[in-house]
Image (cartoon, coloured by chain):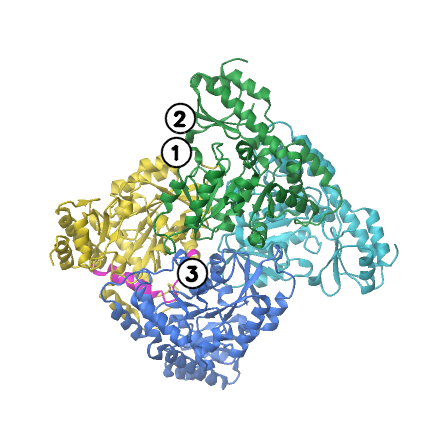
Chain colours: A cyan, B green, C yellow, D blue
Amino acid sequence: MNFCSDNATPANPEVIEHLAKVNQGLQMPYGADDVTERVRLKLCEIFETDLAIFPVATGTAANVLSLSLLTPPHGAVICHEESHINVDECGAPEFFTHGAKLIGLAGAGAKLTPDAVTAALDWDWRGVAHHVQPACMSLTQATEYGLAYTVDEVKAMKAVCDRFELSLHMDGARFANALVGLDCAPADITWRAGVDILSFGATKNGALGAEAVILFDRSREQEMHFRRKRGGHLFSKMRFLSAQLEAYLSDDLWLRNAGHANQMASELGNGLAQLDGVDLVHQVQANEVFVRLPESIFKNLRAQGFEFYDWPLGGPDCYRFVTAWSTEKSHVSALLAAAVGKK
Amino acid sequence: MNFCSDNATPANPEVIEHLAKVNQGLQMPYGADDVTERVRLKLCEIFETDLAIFPVATGTAANVLSLSLLTPPHGAVICHEESHINVDECGAPEFFTHGAKLIGLAGAGAKLTPDAVTAALDWDWRGVAHHVQPACMSLTQATEYGLAYTVDEVKAMKAVCDRFELSLHMDGARFANALVGLDCAPADITWRAGVDILSFGATKNGALGAEAVILFDRSREQEMHFRRKRGGHLFSKMRFLSAQLEAYLSDDLWLRNAGHANQMASELGNGLAQLDGVDLVHQVQANEVFVRLPESIFKNLRAQGFEFYDWPLGGPDCYRFVTAWSTEKSHVSALLAAAVGKK
Amino acid sequence: MNFCSDNATPANPEVIEHLAKVNQGLQMPYGADDVTERVRLKLCEIFETDLAIFPVATGTAANVLSLSLLTPPHGAVICHEESHINVDECGAPEFFTHGAKLIGLAGAGAKLTPDAVTAALDWDWRGVAHHVQPACMSLTQATEYGLAYTVDEVKAMKAVCDRFELSLHMDGARFANALVGLDCAPADITWRAGVDILSFGATKNGALGAEAVILFDRSREQEMHFRRKRGGHLFSKMRFLSAQLEAYLSDDLWLRNAGHANQMASELGNGLAQLDGVDLVHQVQANEVFVRLPESIFKNLRAQGFEFYDWPLGGPDCYRFVTAWSTEKSHVSALLAAAVGKK
Amino acid sequence: MNFCSDNATPANPEVIEHLAKVNQGLQMPYGADDVTERVRLKLCEIFETDLAIFPVATGTAANVLSLSLLTPPHGAVICHEESHINVDECGAPEFFTHGAKLIGLAGAGAKLTPDAVTAALDWDWRGVAHHVQPACMSLTQATEYGLAYTVDEVKAMKAVCDRFELSLHMDGARFANALVGLDCAPADITWRAGVDILSFGATKNGALGAEAVILFDRSREQEMHFRRKRGGHLFSKMRFLSAQLEAYLSDDLWLRNAGHANQMASELGNGLAQLDGVDLVHQVQANEVFVRLPESIFKNLRAQGFEFYDWPLGGPDCYRFVTAWSTEKSHVSALLAAAVGKK
């Protein structure tokens, strides 16, 4: 059984059914279809504000288009040193911003803190031509270690942004998982707390390949149209991208999926934590479990074919287990049994 | 009825069914799934050679990733002045090549000719630091006016490429339509005629959003992996991109779709050409019909709600009609009837 | 004797003497020296307005920094197809604008005309994500054929800019030569006629390597500081760049140099035009002479070692002769004598 | 008196005299002059090997052109976190490499160490599309703290480069100062130790604004011609750039200048170190002195108008003093006297 990544999971069958449903007759291309506007209205409702959406197919595209709107080429993006944009996107942020610099800072659990950012930026760089100009901060919600920033934490980061005149981007590849963990309103953890642009992820949580860049400030909407097209990310048959989002948002599918995944992670984390020699490296707040495993348990799991990543950045003997909407209770039980050598 | 664009058409239902079919269990992400390799092998068979494929979701992505592999930042791409890459991609080729220049040349039917290219390049630019260095030629198959380059024509262009040391890219957004019109082997019109990279389109011809960059020379495969990722075009759940291509290639669906679309265009073109005052602007060789219409016919069609684009680049009173796999014979008959005022 | 280019000429000795003069003691680097501000004030006086200056060492740098300030990556620059920025800068404009497109238009004497620009832009591209967005027009003063835009002509181009919402850049690599030919105030031919940014050239007309980007609208000054540094064009010992400009502007050296060069061109043009079989291809309005020469005269000149470029873009048997501040009357006489076989 | 920076110093008078000397008659532009080739031959002799040179006017240009030749857009440059390219060039390296990432590592005295690099790169990134690909290492000689890498140290770094398949760039903005400090052959500390490209600085050490990119491997020479032009760094009247280098290299002016500057730094460092409460933060190996000063000494110096930078990255109460070819013994004495309150 595979606990490597939520990217390895299938899509919800109802998402694919919905593709079939919107596959009727002709629809004007490039986003001028009916589905895309319906999705926008649905997201306006969910986020309790008027907003612009730009559906794209990958999380990288969502992130880098967002950052490119907020950061000039001579700018810098403040992010965690282990963040996906800094480590796992092959320089796509640099490409789309035309060469802005990512300033990666340390922080437990891959969380940025006001202190770390303040320490990094508290010197005389503003307006000085020799130095890149920090222009944007990017928070990952949930973080690379499955931790969720609380509303107060986001607000505290926003205060730092205000001090240094930074825009605020949220990488929400696992936004639903964080949201469910926080049990708050989508608006509260985003624009009401100061987020300017959200990469709203759906792929990991049940779609085939669909994300939405959400602009809470619509004034830069026009520019984003050019950036998306220029990046090759404007779908001609956009309805099929939007349809995934429509199904994802219908009947709270996104929240149900995330709730289930989180529940599975919680059970997995709790179960493992009770075993001798196992330490949870981080609290389980979303759908990821980071644990230190003794060699015996590691070997037991591998012996029965369980797949999961070792995570050396988390320290020695640190491993990552990811659950998803499709993880079954029996998978968790099987893993916990295997950990102690049962079949 | 809408004859505006093949981008407005639905996907083949069997493509969506195939998405459901591959939606079983976990698959390693980012192209390490089973489907993607099956598609590659299928394309190797179709093109009778070993090749590398890079599935992406948009034609723009396919084109600009291809061009970026063949053209350095100080290079130039020779193309037709009306080509999609020059006119309709918002500078995406310039973005992905980091600023190479597109040199757009004139030519009837949006076809490049050996003479036009030779005239443009026959001066002392090579190695001279003041001038961008032509590095690549891009042919559109079928062209913006629905014309297909014959095997001999592609070979003649390749000879020009060889003279000026250019690589050869083929934008095959409507490759299937051209191929069916030419009635030749895929290999003959591509690598055997000298094409280095093909943008193999599926979206317009029955997919939801799927194209493949095909490298006939595998030596630059590694570099393309980075370029695709960096462009935000690497799908995590790649199986769903590849599955579209798999369905598209199964049981000759791609050729059947294109054959039907071409047949509909042919009937539409022939039917219109027989009407008083109508001139075919170009021969119908694929799935597009360009005609000059007298005002009366234009008004008749609009009166009954037929949608199609005026095409001023084609001359005064020039209009474009595009057919697709989903165009029905009855649509064509209805249009021809409406043209003469019948209902 | 060499009539190939004003780039081949020496610098005015007084420019070098002035370098020695400012070479006293320490001066704060990067433009915070005394000389740079003095040059700015002098240019404010010459142009009768408050302005910002950015000294750089090459004309390419001046042009592309200017264009980068006026053109977004998804934008386009309208220019003449034979303009230096389009033909002779190896894609530097594309590099500094991060991939904007140069749209090169035809026009006699390398002059853009309102009609040519209007014809090129009079379609529905604005706000359409598929198309690059024309953002800036660049006029070369004097043109590649040594013609000067009159004040009325610049104003007419500005009206076209206004219609299409374009900024206006002037490539003044030979600004002094044009100005002297026009006999008008610097302000009249620039900001009063609508020019936003001027590349103010000095290198060809007596400096070692010095140009100034002049911003008539100071609101984008801050951004230019970053762009110049990022391009590697911020001199640490800026005083030596500024000193060249200071000497150039002192005692009207720039105007005297240009006046002399123009006078030499005029005499050369007139002299050649009186010979049998010689046609002036363009009126001589600055320091360049374009003529069609019969073979006999061409051979006579080469036989006596005169160097000049053939200029095939100007038509068959077209040649270019460039004069400069350092061209002597005796050089012109010698050339005219040699043309008819005298020594 | 100003000890802020060697950028604030004048040029050697003999450099300016040499400008006047080469200012005779016409010379073909863009590097096809006599002076440039003479400089190349002189540098071949100095470095005991055939090499290519690209004169440019700024250290930033030299560095970023070098890096751009060694690093693809999806690549990374390994450098010290406090290096000039990482901190003081406003993202110019990212611009010229089209978005490569700079990976800044810690190390005492702004020195990279084999251990630090190995620790950073010893994981499975090679060939993995998610990660930028380290392609180049850049060493600063002398470092930002005025320390010189010994021949053995450079060789040790080269061994790390070989292990990770990195090219090796040396930022020699203060190359002469390091060289004199090391007392070794130029070849030994560069290509014989494995350096591929050297930014050979002259500006800080006596020129007006002149550096040379030196390629020890000439195979990439052609590409550099395009990159330099495209960056706006190809001088039309190149002779004036090359003439500075010619004067700089004549009669060992460069070594004499550096020797003097180093001597002044040494005396300044020794003098300060003998004062109560003063600590040298780093050994003085070139022309920079980093010291911790007690408040009384700091105040004494400021009271008498001495200028120098505080250097917070060096720790609390850390200050930087830079000497140059033009620093006089009496300046040093005056400073040492002022430190203890004498006038």
Q: Which mark is residue B316?
A: 2
Q: Quadrant of the N terminus of chain C?
A: bottom left
Mark 3 burial class by Cα count in 10 Å: few <14, some 14-19, many 20+? many
Q: Which dot marks residue C122? A: 1
> With C96 as the anchor, is D139 left or right in this view?
right
Q: Is residue A149 found inside the magenta-colored segment of the image?
A: no
Residue span colored magenta: C227-251
Task: Please state which amino acid type lies under the numbered disc 3.
Answer: Met
What chain does mark 2 sit on?
B
From the image, tell me which residue sits under label 3.
D224
- Which chain's residue wears label 3? D
The quadrant in which residue C118 appears is top left
- The front one of C154 and C305 is C305
Q: How far apart, in angstroms, are the residues tagged by discs 2 and 3?
A: 48 Å
Dots 2 and 3 on the same chain:
no
Residue type at mark 2 is Pro
Quadrant hosting residue B222:
bottom right
- The answer as to whether the residues below labels 2 and 1 share one chain is no
C-alpha separation, residue under disc 2 versus residue under disc 1: 15 Å
**Residue A144, position in %: x, y?**
68, 55
Residue A13 in the image, given as x and y percentages of width and height:
74, 38
- The majority secondary structure of the magenta stretch comes to helix
Q: Residues within 10 Å of mark 2 (few under 14, many from 20)?
A: few
Q: Is A107 in front, or is B157?
A: B157
Quarter of the figure with the C terminus of chain C = bottom left
Secondary structure under tag 2 reads: loop
